[in-house]
Image: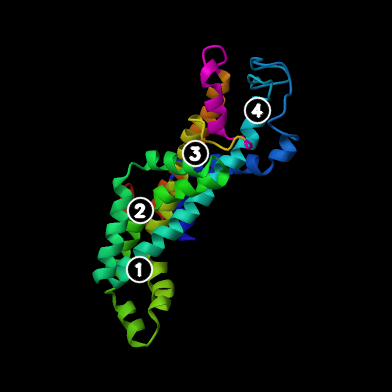
Amino acid sequence: MAFLKRYAENRGAVAGLVILAVVVAVALAAPLLMPGDPMATRGRPLLPPGGDFPFGTDMLGRDVLAGIVHGAKVSLMIGLISTVIAVLIGVTVGAVAGFFGGQVDDLLVRVTEFFQTIPSFIFAILLVAIMTPSLASIVTAIAVVTWPPIARLARSEFMSLRRREFVEAAVLSGLSRTRIIVSEVLPNAMSPLIVMGSLMIATAILTESALSFLGLGDPNRISWGYMIGAARTVFRQAWWLSVFPGLAIALTVLAINLVGEGLNDALNPHLKGRMRIET
């Protein structure tokens, strides 16, 4: 396939895909790699890396490596689910605004701009605090604050495509507007939306980590951000509690960004080297 060949030409994208595949595999195999509850005490508190605990233990004697392995699933799940919800909202709003235009477009643009005027991270903190910290509230908050950029991108794509000959032919053939949007316009607008969606996963993981760092994570589920947040008071005495989860976040976010750039180059070869994303 030409797509795979173009993607493989980007060595950074291939490396990112390999790293991401390893992270996903670790997340899926967490119960086999580190059986048991990662929140349970495994040894003496604040043991440095080495011996039975390659990444050391935390203040309560929990295995840091077990926390990273099990935390991968939570962090990736939050990033993926919140991004899917945000993309569905954004594409729906952008498609309706861009295809119909007129007063509908004006109304939806104003709604999108209203959400964009609110600082996204502060808005996410407020939403999680109101709904009480949990996985559901974190996913909801991230989705609510991240859908406007993809709505604007979808709107611009639909506005440029709705005057194309194949769309006018579909209208003349008597197809409903809903069918035209879903079967004719949307498939031709997917490339930039896929690229932006992949990058939004990285943003969602970072947002979840920041919320957990501030104590707004789910107290019953371990994640990388939760681990860093819990260790911030003992950073000087136990550096490993923050460094290893931080490296996990950095590698995962870097891998996702590399994959996003590779998708951009493969899906839009005429724009190779530039991210065709409206923010």
Disc on res. 148: 2
- Between the C-alphas of marks 2 and 1, the distance is 14 Å
Mark 1: which amino acid?
A: Val
Q: Secondary structure at mark 2?
A: helix
Q: Secondary structure at mark 4?
A: helix
- Between the C-alphas of marks 3 and 1, the distance is 30 Å
- Between the C-alphas of marks 4 and 1, the distance is 47 Å
User: Range of the magenta residues?
Assistant: 220-239
- Judged left or right of residue 27, residue 144 is left
Q: Position of residue 29 (x, y in %)?
A: 69, 42
- CA neighbours of label 3 inside 10 A, class few (<14), some (14 to 19), many (20+): many
- Judged left or right of residue 34, residue 243 is left
- Between the C-alphas of marks 3 and 2, the distance is 18 Å
Contact between marks 4 and 3 (CB within 8 A): the answer is no
Q: Earlier in the sequence, mark 4 or mark 1?
A: 4
- Residue under label 3, please give it: 208
Disc on res. 96: 1
